[in-house]
Amino acid sequence: MKTLIVDDEHFVRKGLILTVPWKEYGFDIVGEAENGQKALEQLSAQPIDVLITDLTMPKMSGFELMKEVQQQYPHIWIVVLTCHQDFGYVVDAMHAGAIDYLVKTQIEEGKMEEALARIEKRISDGTRHRQLAVVQKASCPELILVPTRANGRPDAIPWPVSPTIIPIEQGCFRIADYGFYDVKPLHKFWEDEQLYESWIPVVCESAPEKDFMTTKEWVAQVKESVFYRFRRDLPSPVRFQPVVNRSLKGTEQLEKIDRLFHSLHWIFDTGLFQTWIQLVEETEPNSTYVSDKVGKFLKALSAINGAPGGLDENKSVMEQRNWHELLQSLIELRLYLQQRNFPEETAIGIYKAILLIHDELSENLNQENVAQRVALSRSYFGQCFRPIAGMSFHELLTEMRIRKAEELLVATNDYIYSVAEQSGFQDEKYFSKVFKQHRYLLPKEYREKYRK
């Protein structure tokens, strides 16, 4: 595969070219460029199969280069170069069309082989999918519509031809003979008609058995694909590869995902964070499992004084955050949590304490028993808690209990005394007093106001 390397740092380019065993994995380095403009000149002068590019460069950024390459040379596979501190950009690059990434520090550490093998496999798999798409282009690929709003009607869409519309599970529809043979014109039609506000189009890369297409399992697969691949900020049709006999995800991978996440060391270690993201995207665990896990972390740690806003926002079922949105919020909160001048283990201990408080709000919690459970002495725990959390243990406990009460007041019809108990207040009168001190309304008044 003819490969072009683009990076504004001369020594990075030379290090990549001279020290990495490219040929062992089928890559042939045929050129290098110091910026995006030079890269485009080389692309016009010679055929290229793989582009490896930095993201932050003068004159033309890696993102701008990617956009030009995708428009002019859509067959080229794009891999991005990154430093650990720039990893937030990589997530955007992957969703914008890059197939993988290389970390520059791996060059010095001699750890490029695993990444090269992974990239070579993705290119091989992608090439097979492209070849299959060419064979199938003679007919419209299977299209599934997933609703983003309740009570949508696909027959109200101004299709270019009259399609066959078949209702299936959970408000979804299967569409046949709808007049588009490729994803690009389908996307343009969806944008022009502003259909992304109501429907997510899911294009099946290969047609499964017809009987299987009507099952709950198959629709669940479609929705899982939407969760991991659809972006509201950059909407486009979701490509979906059905699996008729879908085996259970490997428990070993799921245990590793759990173990990495619950350690919280990924907050400070970008390499671990990258590994966790890669494991999730390769394994694609159940979306409810991922949403609950990440959502709970965002909700609990957003109670820290000064944390970025909007991390714990409640949304309707149709608007539940997808993987990209959860990941962006996680990246934002992670960068904020790193800004603590305390030893990593101490900060992690306090963050684990906050998660523990969130999980057990209705229990009789106090500073001593929480400190003991996160393996910190009571005095050191008290000394570190306010500088890290921005408030005392008691203040944060009260704030989290008030937030829990707010949710229950708006989302349920529970009696006030029940809301108080579930939020960790044992006395209804004391609960009402504290709630009014913090929200300037009595619980009943709050419920009436925000339900309206």
Image (spheres, rainbow, N blue to C red):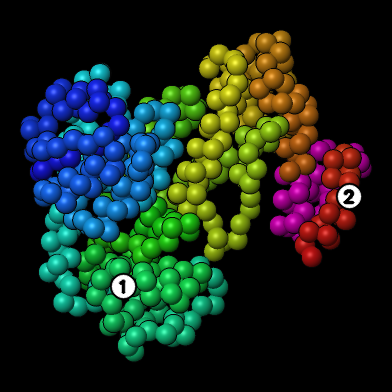
The C terminus - image quarter = bottom right
Q: Residue 285: horizontal and vertical position, in percent? A: 38, 47
Residue density around tag 2, few if under 14, some if 14–19, many if 20 or more, within 10 Å: some
Corner quadrant of residue 34 = top left
- Magenta region includes residue 31: no
- In the image, what residue occupies the spot 72% across and 44% down? 404
Corner quadrant of residue 216 = bottom left
Question: Horizontal placement of 348 versus 389: left or right?
Answer: left
Asked whether the residues under the numbered discs 2 and 1 touch, taking CB atoms below 8 Å apart as contact, a structural biologist would say no
Tag 2 secondary structure: loop
Q: Which residues are magenta?
A: 404-433
Residue 122 visible in the snapshot: no
Question: Horizontal placement of 201 versus 409: left or right?
Answer: left
Q: Nearer the viewer, residue 399 or 308?
A: 308
Instruction: Report which residue position mark 1 lands on.
Output: 185
Question: Horizontal placement of 128 versus 302: left or right?
Answer: left
Corner quadrant of residue 206 = bottom left
Tag 1 secondary structure: helix
The N terminus - image quarter = top left
Q: Residue 64: horizontal and vertical position, in percent? A: 35, 48
Instruction: Report which residue position mark 2 lands on.
Output: 441
Magenta residues, dominant SS class: helix
- In the image, what residue occupies the spot 31% across and 82% down? 178
Residue 225 visible in the snapshot: yes
